[in-house]
Image: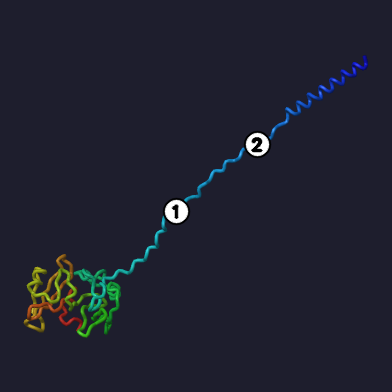
């Protein structure tokens, strides 16, 4: 009887041991395989294709001198008006006239507030082609002796009296101070300004020179002499 009980106990112990082994085997956790992280390719920001704006080139000072001609630099077309020379109007200072021309000029007063001319360079052996009159420190007149420069309205050296009258209706004729056969044709600003243009016409009826400015300087027959 005791031997039978002992065998029963041993059998029960072995059965429990087997159950425990099965349970341990079933409880073994298989490590979860790590899911690979999907790497998304990030496109770098595109570089700007805009070309930086070029620095603005400073504007050159405004002048009214045209490119050099065979006889020298000439005023730009339309620079001489009944109001003056470009931005330098009648009454402007010497410095303002020099700035308006923008190139070298010679001339200086012989006395304070005296009358003198500014002559654009170079001057030829035949004398000046055109000049700016200054009196009492103010710009008052322009003298022109070359056919290359037109007066406002179109008059030029070399034109005859009849052609000038067509261009400037109402021109007043005056006898020249020194030549009774010559004339001074005097016209006023059609816009009503103070400017006056005067054409000197010789005995053959051709314009030899002209001047434009304001009285009384525009009527000085001898210029600054």
Label 1, residues with CA under 10 Å away: few <14, some 14-19, many ≥20: few
Q: Which residue is mark 1?
A: 48
Give x and y (percent) for residue 112. Answer: 28, 82
Give x and y (percent) for residue 151. Answer: 17, 72
| On screen, residue 45 above or below 137 | above
Query: Is residue 186 shown to the viewer in this render?
Result: yes
Question: Which corner quadrant holds the C terminus?
Answer: bottom left
Residue 175, quarter of the rendered image: bottom left
Which mark, by number, is residue 164? none
Give x and y (percent) for residue 88. Answer: 26, 71
Label 2, residues with CA under 10 Å away: few <14, some 14-19, many ≥20: few
Q: Residue at x 41, y 55 (%)?
A: 50
Scheme by which the image is coloured: rainbow
Q: Residue at x 30, y 69 (%)?
A: 62
| On screen, residue 34 above or below 170 | above
Question: Which corner quadrant holds the N terminus?
Answer: top right
- Between 120 and 216, the one lying in front of the other is 120
Q: Which of pointers 2 and 1 lies earlier in the amino acid sequence? A: 2
Which mark, by number, is residue 33? 2
Secondary element under disc 1, as helix, strand or loop, is loop
User: Between tags 2 and 1, which lies in front?
Assistant: 2
| On screen, residue 151 above or below 224 | above
| On screen, residue 127 above or below 20 | below
Residue 64, quarter of the rendered image: bottom left
Q: CA distance from mark 2 to mark 1?
A: 44 Å
Marks 2,1: beta carbons within 8 A: no
Q: Residue at x 53, y 45 (%)?
A: 41
Secondary element under disc 2, as helix, strand or loop, is loop
- Between 62 and 218, the one lying in front of the other is 62
Residue situated furthest top in the rendering: 1
Give x and y (percent) for residue 193. Answer: 18, 67
Q: In the figure, is residue 8 to the left or right of 140?
A: right
């Amino acid at each position: 009887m005791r031997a039978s009980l002992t065998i029963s106990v041993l059998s029960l112990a072995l059965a429990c041991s087997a159950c425990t082994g099965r349970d341990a085997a079933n409880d073994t956790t298989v490590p979860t395989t790590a899911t690979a992280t999907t790497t998304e390719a990030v496109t770098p920001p595109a570089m700007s294709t805009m070309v930086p704006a070029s620095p603005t080139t400073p504007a050159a000072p405004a002048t009214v001198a045209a490119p050099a001609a065979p006889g020298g630099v000439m005023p730009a077309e339309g620079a001489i008006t009944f109001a003056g020379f470009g931005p330098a109007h009648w009454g402007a200072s010497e410095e303002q006239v020099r700035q308006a021309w923008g190139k070298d000029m010679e001339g200086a007063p012989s006395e304070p507030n005296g009358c003198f001319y500014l002559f654009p360079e170079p001057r030829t052996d035949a004398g000046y082609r055109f000049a700016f009159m200054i009196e009492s420190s103010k710009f008052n007149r322009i003298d022109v002796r070359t056919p290359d420069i037109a007066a406002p309205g179109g008059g030029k050296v070399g034109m005859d009296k009849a052609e000038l009258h067509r261009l400037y209706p109402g021109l007043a004729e005056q006898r020249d101070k020194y030549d009774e056969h010559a004339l001074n044709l005097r016209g006023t600003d059609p816009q009503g300004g103070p400017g006056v243009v005067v054409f000197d016409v010789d005995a053959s009826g051709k314009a030899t020179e002209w001047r434009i400015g304001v009285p009384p300087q525009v009527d000085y027959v001898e210029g600054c002499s």
